[in-house]
Image (tube, grey):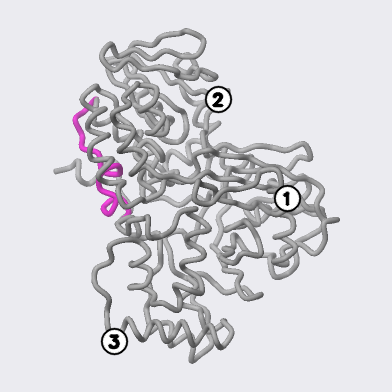
Amino acid sequence: MKILVLGLGPCGLGAMRQAAHYLNNISLMGLDRSTSAGGLASSFVDHQGFTWDIGGHVQFSHYKYFDDAMISFLGEDGWLHHERESWVWIRDRFIPYPFQNNIHRLPEDDLNKCLQGLLEITKSPLPKPANFQEWIHATFGPGLADVFMEPYNFKVWAHSPELMNSVWVGERVSVTDLGRVLKNLVYKTDDVSWGPNNTFQFPKRGGTGAIWKACTNQLPQDKLRLGSKVVHIDLKKKICTTDDGSTYQYDHLISTIPLRELIKITGQTQLMPLAEKGLLYSASNIIGLGLQGKPKDELAKKCWMYFPEDNCPFYRVTVFSNYSPYNVPDISKHWSLMCEVSESSHKPVDHATLMESVIQGALNTGLIASRDEIISTWSYHAPYGYPTPSLHRDEALAEIIPFFEQFNVYSRGRFGMWKYEVSNQDHSFMQGVEIVERLLNGRPEITAFDANHANSQKHPWPFERWQN
């Protein structure tokens, strides 16, 4: 059997790693257009020696297989472990996340508006929501929707919540517990414990990309072709052609490139209307600010912060030097902020002024006190940043994914499967592992097709469903 893997981010590398166990029985090759593997989980070092990721990656896991793989890549001592401190900057103050459980910190007018909305939905529950915006109102009430949820979600998704479905929410959004809200209000206490990533690990050195470099180094190097951009796939002849004219015959193709791009390079133009309607996405702009000195005390232990207001272009900022002291040249002299700005046709970005607007936003929000603190700037544009869970996503996937599978092409990963709810590093890596096990051993995939189950527990290896 000839297996070809297209794209060597976490999903493609997961497929390559698992397939490498079967090299006595199969032919294997992995291609990536970049000269290094890692995809959106790559890291970079700027001219001043600051390390940057493509966004605020943190690592937590739903799978024993993934945990074991991470140790095999970096070793037990290659990781730093953190307790999450995530906050919302709003109304000139920090409020712990989840925001709705800590509204006692809001100014009185906003607090009253949020409480009134919560009481309204408690007395008169709204009907089943038809989209994410209706879900926000049904779950949080009009006050919280207006103060935080609607402005923040437009800022992060670069699409109106009414264009999105709500089936993806699951563990991604904390819902409101009115009892906890009132208890925190009465006792003036903070609730900061919610979430699957309330603790996480991060590589000691090299950023997130160090994980995937180590993974790549453990693979048979003769099975990798980096710097090979696929420009055409003949579905009937099962041949991939790259930009240098090389061709690769396959029996099964595991594609982790964006599904919209797969449609283009296979010439399946009849699928584009479905993709344009259902496969919405946003681009990510990452701005790194390398800073001299030390962060103010208020930022000393914070991991990341959300910014819903319009006094800054970014929706999230990570104190990246807090993830590892080796993310900066000298932790005794430097620290760093990594800012994320979303972009889409619904929310355009002026790239000529983006750096300046981010710096001004950092000043406006008190993240930095002076431009003189900045000694390095770095930027990265990811054309595909987040797959948007649009209203018509699932109906598009229900037609497009089976279409390609009839030609033995299996689209998986963050933008291959287009499911935000299973697009973290652990999810993507395991989608690659699972499709190999399906092709070679007939085992059913879980992560790509049953997000709720994938996120419901820590899965053993082999998977519990494979024991039946």
Q: Assess whether mark 3 and mark 2 are in contact (beta carbons under 8 angstroms).
A: no
Q: Is residue 177 above or below residue 402?
A: below
Task: Return the residue at label 3.
Answer: 123
Write the residue at 66% across / 75% down: 92
Q: Tell me which segment is drawn in magenta.
A: 440-455
Rounded to the nearest whole Å, what is the CA distance between mark 1 and mark 2? 25 Å
Specify the amino acid type for callout 2.
Ser
Task: Return the residue at label 2.
Answer: 34
Q: Along the line of sight, which residue is nearer the eye, 461 or 49?
A: 49
Task: Return the residue at label 1.
Answer: 289
For the stretch drawn in magenta, what is the main secondary structure? loop
| Mark 1, other Cα within 10 Å: few <14 / some 14–19 / many ≥20 | many
Q: Earlier in the sequence, mark 3 or mark 1?
A: 3
Q: Along the line of sight, which residue is nearer the eye, 215 or 98?
A: 98
Specify the amino acid type for callout 3.
Lys
Residue 225 coordinates in the image, percent (x, y): 49, 17
Specify the amino acid type for callout 1.
Leu
Q: Which mark is residue 19?
A: none
Confirm whether the magenta stretch covers residue 31.
no
Q: Assess whether mark 1 and mark 3 are in contact (beta carbons under 8 angstroms).
A: no
Residue 338 coordinates in the image, percent (x, y): 65, 51
Say whether residue 51 is visible.
no
